[in-house]
Image (cartoon, grey):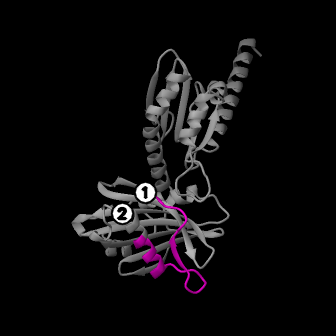
Amino acid sequence: MNKTLFLYLCFAFLTFSCQKKVDSLSQEKAAAINTISVIIDEQLWNGEIGDSIRNKFASPVLGLPQEEPLFTIKQFPLKLFEGFSTGSRNMIIVKKENKSEFKIGINEFSTPQNSFHISGKNTVQIIALLEEHSAEMIKRMRQTEIEACLKTIKDSLLNTKTIKSKFDIDITIPGNYEYALTSRNFVWIKKEITSGNISLLIYQVPYQRIHKYHTVNDIVKVRDSIGKKYIHGRPRNSMMITEEAYFPYFSRIKFNNFDAFETKGTWQMKNDFMSGPFINYALRDKANNRVLILEGFCYAPSKTKRDLMFEVESIIKSVKILKK
């Protein structure tokens, strides 16, 4: 065989093998929800820059009973990825270079994808860029993950005609959820999982019921009254209430152009031993003189709960209030 041709074939084989190795590394968790690929040299990853990335993007999720990271981080050496693409939906690429720069790439290597390029002359510059842009990065990544989560369920959907007629809303709910209970101003939808379940509640109360000055207390009172009326355990007089030992996390947000309240915390079954996390969105729909409330919660004692709660949060965030 011609020597030049032999060397070329060897090079091509090595390149293909390397490409396969990179693809297997990058694709291994590319489809997993809430995962970030961090492309960074080992020396930087094991120092202050790596600590800063972990503190920002793997900080504990608020409202869960056990500590779980906001994102699962997969770190890969920079030299392994130069010249190759990756299928991860979210990438952070960190380099030491002669210029300080933060740049966002949209669908740079695959679709959908956020790639955040961060470079600086030294550790101080890189950490400063992380401090400045981490909130924007997290917001973008979470939105991408919500869209990815919803995309996976659009082939099989629950018939939401009942919800639409009761609340004048459109919402995307997977077909593996079922109606557990419906009444005049209340719908409970549930999905059974191994050793537990995920639930979505939709209900509405008069606009004046949740006051803007003592909002958290009003939301807790409302959700506890819903638990007392509709959500019971097996023992007599057991009902779902807000965990009494911990005050829930609360924030005022914009939700599809509505003023809304986001409340995260832990529920428990009074007079029973069940508990778990909940996330509650109360939308101030002044045009219809109501507060529309969408709440997700899960019971999964033997499972991590971050991605279960993220699924129901994604479903809630697909809601659109219809104009009459």
Q: Identify the residue at horizontal 53%, vertical 62% (top origin).
A: 246
Can the viewer see residue 101 in this picture? yes
Answer above or below: position of 280 versus 252. below
Name the residue at the top extreme.
Answer: 3
User: Which contiguous range is marked in magenta?
Assistant: 221-250
**Which of these two is toward me, 9 or 51?**
51
**Which of these two is toward me, 219 or 71?**
219
Q: Identify the residue at horizontal 32%, vertical 75% (top origin).
A: 165
- Whether residues under marks 1 and 2 lie with C-beta atoms below 8 angstroms apart, the answer is yes
Circle 2 residues within 10 Å: few <14, some 14–19, many ≥20: some
Query: Residue 24 appears at what percent x and percent y?
Result: 66, 39
Can the viewer see residue 154 in this picture? no
Answer above or below: position of 251 versus 215. above
**Which of these two is toward me, 61 or 101?**
61
What SS does tag 1 mark? strand
Quadrant assignment for the C terminus: bottom left
Q: Quadrant of residue 77?
A: top right
Answer left or right for 224 relative to 48. left
On the image, numbered disc 2 is attached to which residue?
A: 215
User: What type is the residue that disc 1 sits on?
Assistant: Phe
On the image, numbered disc 1 is attached to which residue?
A: 250
Which label's residue is closer to the chain start, 1 or 2? 2
Quadrant assignment for the N terminus: top right
Q: Identify the residue at horizontal 53%, vertical 39% (top origin).
A: 56
Answer left or right for 11 relative to 158. right
- Residue 227 lies within the magenta run: yes
